[in-house]
Each structure stands twice: as C-alpha cells, then as structure tokens.
Amino acid sequence: MELVYTKRLNSLIDGCCDGNRKCQRELYNLFKSKMFGVSMRYAQNRALAEDILQESFIKVFKSIKTYKGEGSFEGWMRRILVHTALRYIDKEKRYRCSDEEVESLSIDKSVLNDAMQSLEHEELTKLVDNLPDGYRQIFSLYAIEGFTHKEIAEKFEISIGTSKSQLARARKLLKTKVIELYKRSVAQNGQSAG
C-alpha cells in the first residue's frame, strides 16, 4: 500500500515540476488537511491560517523542482509552511504576550499523569490551539516542529531566554488546562455513575 502511495506521490511531484495543474490540484487535496492543521498552530484565526496555507502551496509549487527526494516530501512542505507562517507572524508582531495570562499553580504530578493519559489527541490539539498566540507559536515550534531555542530566538528577534520562558509559560498553562479538563471529566463521570 505504501509503495502505491509513494509511486503516486512521485508521479504528482513530477507532474507539478512540469506545471501540470491537475497534479497540483491533486497534491493540494492530498496534503491540505494536514498542512491546514499545522497552519492553525501559528495563526490567530482561521482566515489567517488559510492565507498561510495558500501562500505556502504557491511557494511549494514554485520551488518543487528543488525537492531532491531527500527526507519526506511532507516534511519538506511543512518546513515551507512553518517559514511562511513565521514571516506572517513577524509582519504582524503577534508573538508578544502578557504575563497576566498565566496563573501560578502547583500541580500534583500523579494527577497530571492521570490527566495526560485520559486525554484524546484532539483534546490536546485543541488545548494547544487555545494557548495565547506567542505561547502557542513558540510551543509549536519547539515541541512539535523541533526548532531549537536559538532558531526560535532568531526567527522572532527575541532572546533565547525569552524563548525559554515563553515555552515554560506555555507548558505551565497547558498543565493547568489539562488538569482542569481532567477534573471536569472525573466530576462528570462521578455524577453519571451515581
């Protein structure tokens, strides 16, 4: 099955290199959902995420001849999308967040572990998506995309320390939200059992 997918993908890439609109449309349809999900991690709203997605695909089609087959094609596309999103963010300077958005909370590790195990992937994604812009962007770059603090600092023109503190605040806020979600779930299950 994977061999068929790989052959089809390579065929689409070749067609896109030749400027074939049908292949471009098929490639777009094949990856648009995944890439939109990545775009939403960086965008403040759906409209901006769609703009980032469209511009990213334009860049993919313009530079597709530079893809040499090293590494996954999806990873290559994702890198283009992330860089496009970062340029949008840089233009609008959306990475600044206030300290008031984060509450200090001591968390029992056993409760946190229980909470994390009970979460569905979609719930966790929604929690990340609902982080304040700066926290979400830095968390996504570091924890999901694998950027270093140095790379993040360069992209946003901030210090490495700021990147680290934004990540720490994002993690703390996520922990708080995970615990809240877990406690609500436990309370609801307790009520429905009684």
Image (spheres, helix red, strand yellow):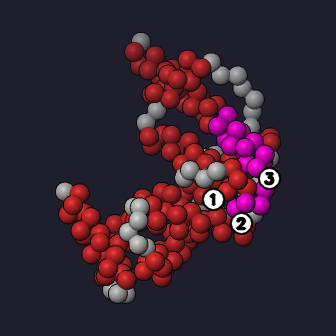
| Horizontal and vertical percent position of residue 108 | 62, 18
Residue 71 numbered tag? none
Q: Residue at x 45, y 61 (%)?
A: 75
Label 2 belongs to which residue?
90
Q: Give the distance between the C-alpha atoms of the residues marked 3 and 1, in whole angstroms.
A: 23 Å
**In this rendering, the label closer to the viewer, 2 or 3:** 3
Disc 3 on helix, strand or loop? loop
* Foreground disc of the pair 3, 1: 3
Return the x and y of residue 182 as percentages of the image width and height: 52, 26
The quadrant the C terminus occupies is top left
Residue situated in front as seen by the camera: 18 or 169 = 18
Magenta-drawn stretch, dominant element (helix, strand or loop): helix
**Residue type indicated by callout 2:** Asp
Residue farthest along the bottom direction in this orientation: 19
Q: CA distance from mark 2 to mark 1?
A: 13 Å
Instruction: In the rendered structure, find residue 44 and report the number of the disc placed on it.
Output: 1
Which three-letter amino acid code belongs to the residue tagged 3? Ser
For disc 1, the neighbor class at 10 Å (few under 14, some 14 to 19, many from 20) is some
Residue closer to the observer: 97 or 144: 144
The span shown in magenta is 154-173
Q: Is residue 187 left or right of residue 170?
A: left
Residue 159's disc number: 3
The kind of residue on which mark 1 rests is Gln
Q: Is residue 187 above or below residue 93?
A: above
In the rendered image, the vertical position of residue 73 relative to residue 129, given as above or below:
below
Q: Is residue 162 magenta?
A: yes
Q: State left or right for residue 187 relative to residue 100.
A: left
Asked if labels 3 and 2 touch by Cβ distance under 8 angstroms, the answer is: no
